[in-house]
Image: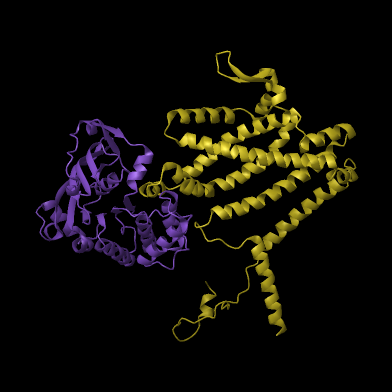
Amino acid sequence: MAGSSTVHRQPAPPAPVAVEPGAHDIVAVPLRHPGRWVLASLILLALLGVGTSLWQNPNIDHPTIARYLFSDRIVAGAVLTVALTIITMVLSTILGIVLALMRLSENPVLNSVAWLYIWIFRGTPLLVQIVFWGYLGLLYKQLSLGVPFTDFTVFTVDTNALIPAFVAGVIALTTNQGAYTAEIVRAGMLSVDQGQKEACYSLGMTPLFTLFKVELPQAMRVIIPPMGNETISMLKDTALLSLIAVAELYTVAARISSQNLHQVELLIVVSIWYLALTSILSVPQYHLERHYGRGSRTLGPTPIGRAVALVHRVRRSQEGNRK
Amino acid sequence: MNSILESPSPVRTDEHRLPLVQARGVRKSYGQLQVLKGIDVQVDAGQVMCLLGPSGSGKSTFLRCINHLERIDGGRINFDGELIGYAQRNGKLHEMKPREVARQRRGIGMVFQRFNLFPHLTALENIIAAPIGIKRIPKAQAIAQAHELLEQVGLGDKAALHPAKLSGGQQQRVAIARALAMEPKLMLFDEPTSALDPELVGDVLDVMQKLAASGMTMIVVTHEIGFARNVADEVVFMDGGVVVESGSPAAVLGNPSHERTRAFLENVI
């Protein structure tokens, strides 16, 4: 505040000065942050050290990384990983919403069933569940549709024929994720103000219409950020399906390295892919958050919008300098 | 719940003579706490009734009972010739299905203290949601009607704005328009101006006064004594879950017969 006395040293009482919009009436020397520069230099040095040690490490064969990064088998594995992520996230979200609504319903039967489901699928390791579904054939050699405790059956099939590894993987990841998603959706639903429901009911809306028109859209604002997290987790958890031989990214890489013995190189290839895929995933999350945040806060421009505005500003200032 | 079944069944009289809203012996408890201890009021079509009383007197609870947001424990509420929340068959009361309750509520609009607009929808979308989704009115017609209603509440230029961009008074007027879009026979107002800045209260009261003049039947829970004096046909003073006194505004507000009413009015005015 010491500077303020020098700024307002006019003899006349300070009258409100009409400042042209956009004009700066304070020209001050910005606060310096020398600590930041020191810290940044140290970190940069450390990163350089790690980078060089990796680059010069004789145990890493860099051409192998380059050769396999976009090889057909690896790309096919990555495609399957993305497909698995999308399929399981869509199915598990539907399952999660249904489970959440069951948990929130006044029907004690639905409520208990959902609670039991979430208890089991959240309470046992995903790894165990995946192996369970993969080896379902050991538990039930044949699956049949019919009336329990009678001899009446509609059809009977071999378990392994009905559920190949890919399907077992999708079921395992979907059923497990559904339990987690259910809790996220439930928290989102609970975050919606009770007055919203009352307003809907007072307008003569049915509970189902209220749910889809008013409650879920508002719950989405709370649901989307953790769901982005879950999607990123899911993308990486698909690697667990290597246990039941689903040919996704990690399985493919492990198979290749078991032949050429370049384990480290293929792990790096796999890491690059996962890192790239998770980075891409944050884009739709950003836009979903904006979409469901409308009405609740002022939305700034998107990064692309900001970049365009920056280009315009730079161009305008250049023109200004020329004049 | 038992007391509802034990109460005498309502006497069927000529429909034309029946008031639009008739409450008899309405009782309501939250656990051990009895909030309504037998409320008897009635409102004829086209009339405006103001409910006054200290907070905790049960007036808001009673209002919420009329459109079955709260379930009553005893007594009866009749609206437009029907029992609220229950169907009477063979001398027995049956709880209504949610769908039937929803149908009944379509005839009753409600305005809340906290507005309760849908924050993810624009003013216009707030108004057309129920007419399109529930009444199945064609979209173009609903939009035209919504614009007309916004015009009537003085917000013709705010149709595209989300509630967060509107002042409290503007939000409350959108909420009134939203309730009116369902073309109700009765409007319930639950302290509609209590959450507003003093300077915004007038706009909302003006809209309500116009609505009353247009012949809408209204039950208004309010602390605005001036509004009650100018607009109400009947003023009901409640305290401790009972009606202390009721009558014309001149009688209840000008010359209260109960000490409790007098004390309340002295504090409010």
Is residue A247 toward the left or the right of residue A119 in the image?
right
Is residue A166 toward the left or the right of residue B249 in the image?
right
When the figure is inspected, residue A118 is found, relative to residue B129, above or below; the finding is: above
Q: Nearer the viewer, residue A174 or B135?
A: B135
Residue B125: x and y in percent read 46, 57
Q: Is residue B62 visible?
A: yes
Structure colour scheme: by chain
Q: Residue at x 57, y 54 (%)?
A: A291
Name the image quarter holding residue A86. top right
Q: Colour of chain B?
A: purple
Residue B75: x and y in percent read 21, 38
Q: Nearer the viewer, residue A52 or B211?
A: B211
Q: Is residue B221 visible?
A: no
Name the image quarter holding residue B78. top left
Quarter the C terminus of chain A occupies? bottom right
Residue A108: x and y in percent read 43, 29
Q: Residue at x 84, y 50 (%)?
A: A52
- Provide the letter of the chain coloured yellow: A
Is residue B140 toward the left or the right of residue A26 in the image?
left
Q: Residue at x 35, y 40 (%)?
A: B100
Residue B60: x and y in percent read 27, 49
Is residue B191 toward the left or the right of residue B144 in the image?
left
